[in-house]
Amino acid sequence: MGIIKSIGILTSGGDAPGMNAAIRSVTRSAIYNGLKVFGIYRGYKGLVTDEIVEFKSQNVSNIIQMGGTILKTARCKEFTTPEGRAQAFENMKRHGIDALVVIGGDGSLTGARIFAQEYDIPCIGLPGTIDNDLYGTDTTIGYDTALNTILDAVDKIRDTATSHERLFFVEVMGRDAGFLALNGAIAAGAEAAIIPEFSTEVDQLEEFIEHGFRKSKSSSIVLVAESELTGGAMHYAERVKNEYPQYDVRVTILGHLQRGGRPTAHDRIIASRMGVASIQALLEGQRNVMIGIENNKIVYVPFTKAIKNDKPIDKELVSVLHELSI
């Protein structure tokens, strides 16, 4: 493809606080650099069904503080088929869109990588997911806000747990990654975190009961990642009832509460930085890369690396939680 004159922006997958800040940043940076901008509604579905609207600067006014995504998001089975992607490409050509900026998680970037390979379209990804599970970036858009939402909820649960001397299992998001559970546990002063990364190594419940839980404590809180690998909070509550019936146990599942809310300053800043970086990347001739931040510096991460490589948990954080739970 030749010189890029116009770009399309879409948000895909689960919504994350800060996506609107990213949309605003991409739009305004593109316009600042002389590019036309098209907002694509409902993710890849809108690309297939032609829900494409030209954006001006005023289209993104007053959205930096909003949660969710003004562009909406939706699942799209059609885009997983060659016929659906062909239709999406035809719609892009009709609007004169030369490149795409895709804001989303693992599945969204996978779709972008396949589309880019089939039709030689420059695609830039922004890591928008509360799970913080994309390789190549220290943090993802939405993670900090979700972490603070968890912290606020657990602080409130602690009041009840202490008043009734109960053991609470609090289930947080993180289907394949324990970043929210582990860091949420440290920040909230919880006694343990049960995460998918260690699901096959040890019996995390037994380890907690043996080393982390004392009846002398007025309360105990354990954060559990919702992963199938862990079994979720209900699984562990049932185990406690059966194996340790002396404990009064309760479960709170935070669910989609974690996705919503106004983004924190941190999420607004990284979304703004990444949005500007996505346009710079396109102007530099970059393609098929995710914008990441490592050691507070913008980096370009090839889609294949960001998608295929597992982001490791820092085991030092596990040790910190273990030591502080006594």
Image: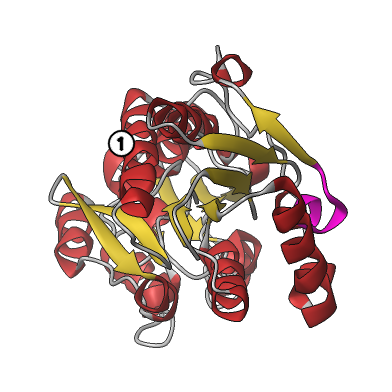
Packing grade of label 1 (10 A; few <14, some 14-19, many >=20) is many
Queried whether the magenta region covers residue 49, the answer comes back as yes
Is any part of residue 182 visible from this angle?
no
Up/down of 94 relative to 264, above or below: below
Task: Please determine whether, in this image, residue 77 is positioned above or below residue 304.
Answer: above
Q: Position of residue 247 (x, y in %)?
A: 52, 56
Residue 71 located within the stretch drawn in magenta: no
Viewer-closest of 296 and 197: 296
Instruction: Say left or right for 174 vs 257.
Output: left
Specify the quadrant of the image occupied by residue 30.
Answer: top left
Q: Please, which residue is most extreme toward the front here?
A: 2
Q: Which residues are magenta?
A: 45-51
- Viewed as shown, does residue 283 lie left or right of 41? left
In this rendering, the count of numbered labels is 1
Residue lying at 32% horizontally and 52% vertically, measured from the top left? 281
What residue is shown at x 74% (from left), y 41% (from top)?
Answer: 41
Q: Residue at x 15, y 44 (%)?
A: 296
Of residues 211 and 147, the one nearer the viewer is 147
According to the picture, the residue beneath numbered tag 1 turns out to be 273
Position in image of residue 69 (x %, y %): 63, 34
SS assignment for the magenta stretch, majority: helix
Q: How far across and down, in percent of the image, does residue 237 sit? A: 60, 62
- Up-down: is 193 above or below 62? below
Q: Secondary structure at mark 1?
A: helix
Position of residue 268 measured from the top left corner of the image (x, y, whole percent)? 38, 28
In this rendering, position of residue 192 left or right of residue 45: left
Residue placed most toward the observer, 150 or 168: 150
Q: Amino acid at mark 1?
A: Arg
